[in-house]
Structure formats: structure tokens, C-alpha cells
Image (cartoon, grey):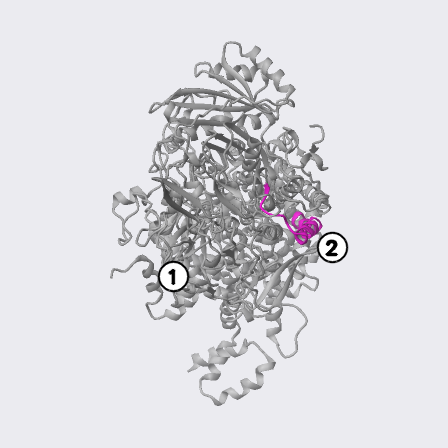
Amino acid sequence: MEVINTLMETVMSNQVSIPLIEPMLDLLPEIPMLQYMVAFMLWKPLFAILICPGLTVGGITLLFFPWIERKLCGRAQWRVGPHEIVWWLGGVIQILADTLRFLFQEVIVHKDAHRPYFLQFPFLSFMIFLLPLLFIPAGTIVAIQTPYAIQIILALVCLFPLFILGLGWASNSRFAYIGTVREAFVYFAYEIPFIIAAIAMIILYGTSDPLLMASRQSIPGIILNPIAALVFFIGAAMATSRMPFEIAESDQELCAGPHVEYSGIAFGLIYVLCYEKAYILSALMTILFLGGGSGPAIAGLGDLSGVFWFVVKTYLVLTTLFMLRTVYPRYRLDQGLKLGWSPMLCLALIGLAISLVVVAVRVI
Amino acid sequence: MEETEKDRNIRILHSGVFTPLRRWATKWSLWPCHFLTSCCGVELAHTGACGYDMERLGTLNMGISRQTNFIMVEGTITRKMARALRIVWEQMPDPKFVNVIGACGQRGGIFWNSYNITRPSDIVPVDFFVPGCPITPESLLRGVRAVQEKIEGRDNTTIRFKHVELPSGDGEENRAPTTPKIFAPTPLVRVDVPRDVDWAFGNDLVKNLKAQLKGLYTSITITDKNRIAIKTTPENLVETSRKLSDTMGVDHVKNVNVIDVPHERKFMVEYMVSGYTEELMPVILTIFTEIGREAEPEIPSLTSLWESANYSERELHDFFGVQFKGNEGMKGKFLLAPDTPDTPLRKDFKLEEEQYTIEDGVPLTSAITPPHYMPPSSSLSYSESELEDLKMPAYEDVLKEAEKNDEFVAFIGPHHSGSGHLRWVMRMKGDIIKDVIPDPGYVHRSMEKIAENRLYIQNVPLTERPNITDPINMNLGYVRAIENALGIEVPERAKYIRTIMAELSRIGAFFYDMGIFPLFMGHSTGFMYSFAIREMVLELMVRMTGSRCTPSFIIPGGIRRDISDDVLDRTRKFTTAIHKRLKKYENIFVYNPVLISRMKEVGVLTREEAIRCGIVGPFLRASGVEYDVRKAEPYEVYDKLDWEATTGDAGDCLGRIFGRLEEMKQSVKIVRQAVDAVQEMPRDGVISEEILGDYKEASGDIRGYLYNVYGDLVLPKGEWTSVTEAARGTVLYSIISDGESNVPYRVRIITPCWMNLRGIIEASKGERVADFWTVYASFGYFPPEADR
Amino acid sequence: MKSMKKVVGPEYNLGEKIKTNVYAVGVAMQESVYPHTATVFYPRERKKMPDNFRGFILFDPDKCISCFNCSFVCPANAIRMKEAPNKRYYPTVDYGRCIFCHFCIDSCSGGALKATKIHDVAYKDMDEMFTPTEEMIELPEIIREDKKYVEYEIEEDDLHLKRTKGEDYLFVDVPPPIQIPMVSQCIDRASCIGCRVCEEMCESGAISSSAENGMLRMKIDTDKCTGCGLCVKECSMQILKLERK
């Protein structure tokens, strides 16, 4: 009994407060058990995992963001994008149909593939890709609060390419091989400037706790240090293989590179991976440069106000990231590498210097 | 009844707990694995582009077989391609669907009696057949809708005919007529029929040639203006050519041709050569010789002298079995599949005859034997040997050599999102291309053999099929060769309209290439924008001719019918309307700094290299050769209009693309001027009265009398060669007539892409792997055009 | 060749690089806010094809003179003639081969073959693609889901899509082509060997034969002659010729 009480205390002390639904919550104690469940749901860490930025918002992003992307690109390309499936809603459930189709389709494991890894990697990488969400705060809501959150997220983000390499290796195909090698090259090219840009911001704010970072961004980071923001954005585009850095997957050269042999739900998972990756990196960008969940408080939403601003900003970054596809063609591998190793690295170092200067000015 | 493979896919959808969900999801997520085998692929691209936007229906085009569930077979499946179709189909996860679009994939369309085609329905189970040649985007989408309905459980043909009883009566039984084709029993085949022409330079040239080639030639004849035939012996062939190359500045081969004359037991081998010096530019020298008609006749190759003859010699080795000694590619087949008949262009290989009547119970076409490696459709598993049979040839020697040199080999194509229908064996060291070995012929539809079995007028639709992105120019070349032979003067109005259409066609081809180029660069917006502009061009085409891509509108002596003022007015507006969208296209794609950096100094061909490889057209001009047929040997009304040909000297991808961009702008200028001129002209007929004969009233519109006028067209004896500037370069038609038959004795078609193939290989050597696609796309390579 | 225009590709400095980047992004942003969409929403609307569009073919047996021209000229051998109950030959079309060049319609002097605007059809089976004469006489029904039709209007400034409610018509009846009356004439009676091929060929019964003093004498009735030219083509001595009436 005592254990439950302590647990309840912990839970109740860290609740998501939403003034708008409080009258409803007050009615709840009359229904047995439900109040505990609601209390658990509104427990910040659990809320973060289940609702935002965790499974619900993440799931919605994966399910609807590709649609938004396809619609927006379609619009910019003088056409309409997915439409007929429910035409009065503009084909909003197109991705659901695609996902279900992949789910019900045969998964082919070809003869030359390394069977266990070929099947494990898509699922494993999907799990690993979810981990950074534990450390990303939406407003004030975060699953695990630690002063080293940014470092942990970066470390996990740096794990991603390893899984892509695994996918490519297990496929045992010529195109997958070339694609995998390219992925490895690009990985090294963007990783360093990308991390330096993040470190620049950590120095600037003097902390790597995302919640503190948000509170210290009375002026958003993107204005304080635009150079680092640019480097971080380009690095994110490279990390998620967006145009113009879709070098490893390049559909017309390598038939999607590491993914060439995947079919059915295994491909479905890989297909959403890049959106998942983009979602995490956009969230990170929001925290580092756009002030996280800070924004004018919306009456009645309470803690959800932060969540709202966080989601809006993240989607803004995501959209920008995906709209790059309509503007740029693909770089060649050596050009991509050159860009990563020289201008981006230089810019990242300049960004670092700017941070130091800003910190110095602040101290003086 | 045994379950067919076709039913199996539907059964998979209808089994299990989640049946409704499965069906719904599959219905709205049919991703076609674009099987761009031939010309219908152009319309598929239009369906995918913003004009119709296939993605609306959830049908997202994707190039990778593992992730798709729908094949649209776009047109001809040749014997070489059949294997790829089966492999791709096998690679796809269940449930999967197949639509065949275009007549070629059904009963063969215009290629129905070709020696190199198969029927897709023999190779994979087909769900729906969409008629058309090419299909329109609408009918393609109708096919998609039909599959969607089939998934829901309604498997129906979407047209319902009404049956009307025919009048009965007791007429007399009539005899069915025989074929309208006349073949001379012992045709007199000569390529050096002398002709009196007013050509002072030619007479000097002949004198000069006679002096230079003393003792090497048998005869030198002027066969037409700008055409000289030099007869020599096989022994002297190389020496003659060397003399020409050393002293006269002859630097490239335009065409290599073999003519089979079985009743005289000989082959005639001819090389059409020319030089890119100012006075030699319009001249074509035909060096020809005769060799005995044995099983494996031999003749020395001229490849060492003129690299540009290389691929054509290899091609002719396939067709006639002639050994060109000295050419390395004389082992094995180049264009043809292993199971195509040997030496199909020899006269003793006969194609299936046309039937003009139909009787109950007689099958419509005799069956085309499916390729031997197709497993029986009922069995779903392969035995080891069948599997081995199904694999594409693996180039063992190349693999071994590459391993020795520490190189990596990738086999690209024929089904690859960026290969086109060609197989490239790419040897690379790290990221650098060491060599690319082309394996063409996946769309070889035996155009030349078919052409020598059809009436002259029936070849008009045929000649535009190699390249339906640029149909008018392809047509124009063929028709001009006929007009030249018959000595017909085309009415002025028709000439102008032809010019308008040829230039529109050139604009269309440019936007096709510049739509595929962005795709290769991963830039879908560029693709959409340029196809939107192309959609405008096609709108004009359909209003002028009634067909989007295959007008068949230019006929000997003029055009089929006059075009209305309304359409002319639209064309005039088009010349200004294009600029708004073009500007956006340029800003987002052409001038995009990423693209510029991709193109600059990539795939450089110097002037010498370009000439040596024999590349033609805007790509040759981009390397600094100032040769444009429209300027060098003006036809239609090009000499009356104010325009400039383009040239450049960088010779890289950037130069090629910007050269063509400027050329397209010049085309718009030409169209504008020509429309202005036509609008002021009286409507006094668009078909030459010389050719109409008794049917003079039809000069404004051929409707009703096409066959009466053109059915019995016979060309004078001799060889008639025309060169035309098509969108991608010089297209050469060489028609050999015996003077008696109403079918040509031999038609040789040299398309620009075929000549450019060598250039692509040379330009991509030493570049990075990704650059191969830049080079490939900058040449606007169109496989059906190259393979013919 | 001095009039050739030299084209040089652009070379960017940093400023121009930024400028072109901004332009490219600008176009994308502008178009995503205010797009110049050019999409036709087939199957819910269809593009209006011009009246001369080359689609499926209709046939009017009353106007047919069974001249075989359509069959002879067909480059794909899709048109083959079939004997009707009244012993005349009428065309059939195999849409598995038809390339829609409409050479047949341009060769039909009587105007018996007519073009429709039907082109969006999917067949379940290849055997169904063969259309006998009986099915070519009336306009077939196709599945139509379209409620609107769209016209591509090319104006001086840009391409515009004009949408109109209602169904586009699929068949335009055009007047028959200009009549150029031709008749078959024998140009060298003396050479006639009396094989009677011409009589057997003639679908309109214009050629008759009679025996005169042991010689077969052929007669051409110019009123009945339709000028189809079959006898001219088949004449074994090549002594017949089409001439103007």
C-alpha cells in the first residue's frame, strides 16, 4: 500500500496540467480506477512517451506527414498529389493505404541475403530510432530529464547510419553495396560539422538540458547563431538523405541503394524510418535553435501550450526539410563529401566562434 | 480447373481475416514498376506528370521491383526483353498485377510480323489490355481503374459494343483480292544510278576524287545533288577510305549498309562518309563494294579508320552475318537476342504475310513462339536449370578481368530506374568509371526488315515509331527521301506547316529530354515543369493532327490536311505563352547551382573525340562542330526564316544542355515566323498536284483518297538518301528501290541516338559513377530510337 | 557557317550562387502558395479532345463499296474484311493491333468509316479486342465517370484550364469526303484473255461477261461501277485502268 501511495505521490507531483479539461477531470473520482489511469496518463514522463513527442504525435507524423509532403510537393509541381482515395478530404489517408498494403504484402528474402540480419535490421532500427524521443521535451514534458540530454540524443542519432549499413550489408546486392558505401562516406562527412554545430549551441546556452535551453532562448538560437543553424540544418538534410544529399539512396542510380531488396512490411518500416529520423532531427533543431516549446501561452491549454508550440515548430522544420526535394537536384558523392568536409566544417567552426563571442559578450 | 497465376493474386487478396482491408489498401496503393519498354513510356511519363498526375489515384511510379505490385508493360516486349520482364515479375511480391498498354504488347501493333517481338501475355499473366499506339494518358488511367475494380471483384472490359445485324441479301459470292504489294521477281538493285544534276562543285569533286583515287576505284558517279557513289573492290576498300580520310578530310561515317541481292549471289556493302569541313558538309560519299553471298562473307572493317562505323558494323553482322574483319565485336550477337532467327535481314528470311480477309475459325494471327526459357505458367517453382536459363547473361570474361584489376562491376538495366532500356555493364574502380560496355537491342523491333515488306505509304507511321517524342522530324526524313526520288515540289503552304510542326516536335523532344534529365538528377519538379510545357505542345499536336504523339501527318507531297486558323492562332499564342512557364522551369532547374555544378566539366568530348565517335546533332555542335543540316543543306523553309543554329566549344554536359536550350528558343522563334507567314497565305492546297494525279480535288484534304493516291507509289531505281536534322541529331534514311516494286527494296534508318551511343560511352569514361547519368541524360538517349 | 550562335554555359561566383538559390527557392515557395496546376482529374473529368481526334472507328455499311482500301492501307494489318450475310466484304478491326493512324478513314472514299473520340478502354481479354463488323456500326458504351470536361486553353500569357459541367460528346459526324467519280476502263481490249477475274472481283456487279462468237466479251457498266479499283488491281493482263468519269 505504501508503495502505491509513494508512486501516486510521484505521479501526482508531476502532472500535465490542462486547465481546459480540469472540470472533466474533477468528475472522474466518482468512477473507480479511472482516475488512477488518467493520472498515470497525465504523468509527464508517461505522457511524453505515449502522447507527445512520443508515440501518438510520432505516429501521426509518420502517418500523415508523408501525405503532407506529397501534397505540398504536388502543389509546388503544378499537380495535386494523392487525391482520389477520399477526394473530399484530399486523399488524407493515402499513407494508411500504402502502409496496409505493405503490411499485407509478401516479404521476400532472396537467396543471397543474410537471412537473420536481413529480417532483423528493419525492426531493430525502428526500435533504436525511437529511443531519442525519450530525451526530447515537448514544452515542459519530457520522459527522462537529464542534463546530458543533447549529448545522448546526438549519440543515438549517430547510431542510425550503422543500421543502414547493416541493411545494405545483409542485402548482399551490388546496388545495396554501392549505396551502403556511399552512406558510410556521407556519414563521416556530415557528422562532425553537425556535432560541432550542436556543441556551439550548448556552449551558447551554457547547458545541455533541453528544458533549460528553451528557457534561455528569449532570443531564439537561430538569430543568435544563424551559421550554426544553417550547418545543423544542412547536416540534418544529409543525415536524413534529403535532396540534394540523397546520395546513398539515389533512386535513379542505385534503385534506393541499401533498400533495394526489401519488400513488404520490411520496406514499409524502412520507408517510415527516414520520416522518423527527420522527425527526431527536426525536434532537435526546434530545441536547439527555435526555443523548443516556448511561445505565447495559450489560455486553457496549460502545459499543452508548450506541446503545441513544439509540434508547430517541429513541423515547420520538417516541412522545410522535405520541401528541399522540390528545389534541388542531387549532389554527386564527391561534391557532397567536399561540402561536408570543407565549407560545412569551416562554417561549423565559425558557428562555434560566434557562440564563444556571444558568451564572452554576455559575461562582460 | 487449375488455378491460373492470374487468379492466384486475386485469391490472395480475398483470403484471411482482413480481406476488406487488404482489398481496400491494395486498391488504393497500386505502385507500378514502370516497365518503360518503348514508346508508350512517353505517355506513361505524361500520366505521371502534372498533366494527369497518376499519384492522385495512389498510383506512385517507382522503379524498383521489390517494392511495387503492378507492372505496366509499355509496348513492345522484344525477345531480348522478355527475360527481363519475367525476372521483374518474379521479383515482385504477391499479390501483383499486370497491365499491357499499347498495341505492340497485344497482337503486335505495327510490329505484328517483326522477327524480334514476343507477346507479354505469353510471359506473364496479364490482367488488362489497353489499346492504342501509343495509349493516351486517359486510357492508361482507365486501365488502372479497371485493375482497381478487379480488386474489388468486378472484372470487366470497360467497353460494351452494340450488336447490329448486317444487311442480309443474296449477292454473288465474290473473290477476295490478293495482296496489293508488287515485288519484282528479279529486282535490279543499283546504288550508283547516275543522275544529271546542276552541281558544279560536284563535278569538280568527282574530278578531284578520280585523281586522288587513281587505280583504286571502279567507278565514281554523281547519283544526286550532294551524293556521290564510289565503287571499289573489297581489296581496295581500306586503301580508298584511307586516301579519302588523309587527303579529302573525310572524318566520319554517317551510315554503314549491307544490301542482300540473292539472285545475283552478292552482298553490297556501302559506307556513307562525309567530312565536317565547310564544303564537304552537305556531301555524302558512298563507298560501296560487292562481296560474294556465302554463309560467312568477309570484308575488311573500317573501324580502325573511322571509329564511328563500329557499332553499325556490329549491327550489320547481326543482320546479315557479314564478318567485318578487324572489328572486335564480331563474336556473338549485339542487337539481337540469342533466340532471334539468325541473319534475319537476308532476303531469304521471310516475314509473315498480311491477310486481308478473315474467315470464321481461323486464328487472327499465327502464334508467336514464346521464348524457350519461359517455364510453364502453371508451375510456380523453377528447377535449377530453368533458373539458370532465366538469368541474364553475366559477361564472365568481363567479371574475371575486373577482378584481376581490382575493379567492381555493376550490371545496370535493362530494368533499372535510370538505365532506359539498355543494359550497361559498368566497370568502376572506386567511384571512377573505367569502362562502360553497352548492350543495346532491348527495343530492337526490326524496323528495317518490316519497312522492306510494306508499301511506301505504310512506312510513314512506321518511321515515326522509333521516336515518338519527335515524330514529325522522323517522318519528314523518310518523306523527303521519297519526294526527292520522285522529284516532287511541295506546295509552299505545306512547307511552312511542315516547318511549324517539325519545330514544335523539336520543342517537344527537348522538353522530353529535359524532363527525363531532372528525373535522373532526382529533381521531380523539373520533370513536372517540363512535361507541363510538353503537354502544351501535345495539345497543339492533337489539335493539328488528331493524335498526341504519333501524327503520321506528313505524307509524300505535302501533309494530310490543311490546319485550321484556330489552331494556327493557338500556335501563335503558344510562342508567347511558353515563356512564363519556361522561366520558372529555368529558375528552379536549369540555373539551379546544384545542377550547374553537376554538369560543369562533366563528360567532356573535344571536337576531335566527338567527330571520331560519330556523335551528331546538338551534341556535336556543343563540341564545336558547326554542322546543322538545316543550315548546311536547307530543306522546307529553313533558309527563308531568320534563325541561328547554336554551337559551343565546351563539349561538356553543361554545353550540351544549354546548347539545346538555346536551340529550343530558336525553334520557338521559327514557329512564330512560320505561323505569321502561313496566316497570310491563301488556302490553296497542301498536297502537291504532281502526286495527286487524277485526284486533284483532294489537295486540301486527302480524306477519302489516301490509298488511291499512294497505294501504288513506285520510286525510281537507285538509292535515295536524305538527311534531316531531328531533335537529337541527324537522322538518315536511305531507301533503295528497284524501280518496279511498290515496296522499298531496302530501307536503312540511322537514328541520331544510335550514333550518339558511342559518344555516351566515351564521355562517361573516367567520370564518377553518378556522372554517368548526367552524361546519359545530357545526350537525350532514347532507346527505341537507337535500337529501331 | 558564320551565322552560328555560340552558347556558353553560366559560371557562378558566390553572389550569383546565392541569387540562383534564392530564385529556385522562390519559385518553389511561390508555386506552393499560388500554384499553376495543370492537372486534369480523369476519371472524374475528362479532357476535351478536338473533333479531329483519332479514336475508335465506326462503320456505316450503307456507304461501303467494299473496295478493300482500308484493309490494304492499314500498316498494322488490323483491318481485315469479312464476308457479311449479303456476300459483301465489310471491314473488321482488331484493336489489339490498331495503331489509330486513321489511314483507313483517309482511304475510305465513300465515308463509310468514321472516327469517334473514344480512346480510354481497357480489355480483360485479348480475344475481345477483335471487333467484328456488327459491333462497329453503333457507338459503343464506355464507362464514364466524368461529370465535367476540361479544355486546355493556350492564351498569350499562359496555359489555362477551362472546366465546363456536362459530358463531352464522343462522336462527331463529318460530311463524306469530296466525291471524285472514277470508273474502271479497259484500255486494251485486244489483250483481254477472258479470265473473268475482274467479274469475280467486282462487288457491285458492274462487270459482266457474255460469249460472242466463241469469244468471251467483258462489259463494264459505268453507272454501276463504284470506282473501287479492285478489278484494276487484279486484272491478270493489267489492261484495266481507273479513269475519271
Tag 1 residue: B168
Query: Relative to A67, is C194 above or below?
Result: above
Identified by mark 1, the residue type is: Ser
Mark 2 belongs to chain? A
Q: Does any portion of residue A206 appear in the rendered image?
A: no
Answer whether residue B584 is magenta in the image: yes
Q: Does dot 1 land on a helix, a strand or a loop?
A: loop
Q: Does dot 2 land on a helix, a strand or a loop?
A: helix
| The magenta segment | B558-586
Q: Pick whichever, A304 or A216, lies toward us.
A: A304
Identified by mark 2, the residue type is: Val
Instruction: Report the predominant secondary structure element of the magenta stretch.
Output: helix
Where does residue B334 sit, x and y in percent of width and height? 40, 33
Tag 2 residue: A361
Q: Which residue lies furthest to the bottom in this view?
A: A30
Query: Relative to B73, is A207 above or below?
Result: below
Quadrant that contains the N terminus of chain A: bottom left
CA gap between label 2 and label 1 equals 104 Å
Q: Pick whichever, B358 or A248, lies toward us.
A: B358
Please tell me how crowded label 1 is: few (under 14), some (14-19), or many (20+) other residues with Cα within 10 Å.
few
Where does residue C129 sit, x and y in percent of width and height? 40, 56
Where does residue B359 sit, x and y in percent of width and height? 33, 52
Q: Does any portion of residue A325 appear in the rendered image?
A: yes
Q: Does the residue at mark 2 contact the one at mark 1 (Cβ under 8 Å)?
A: no
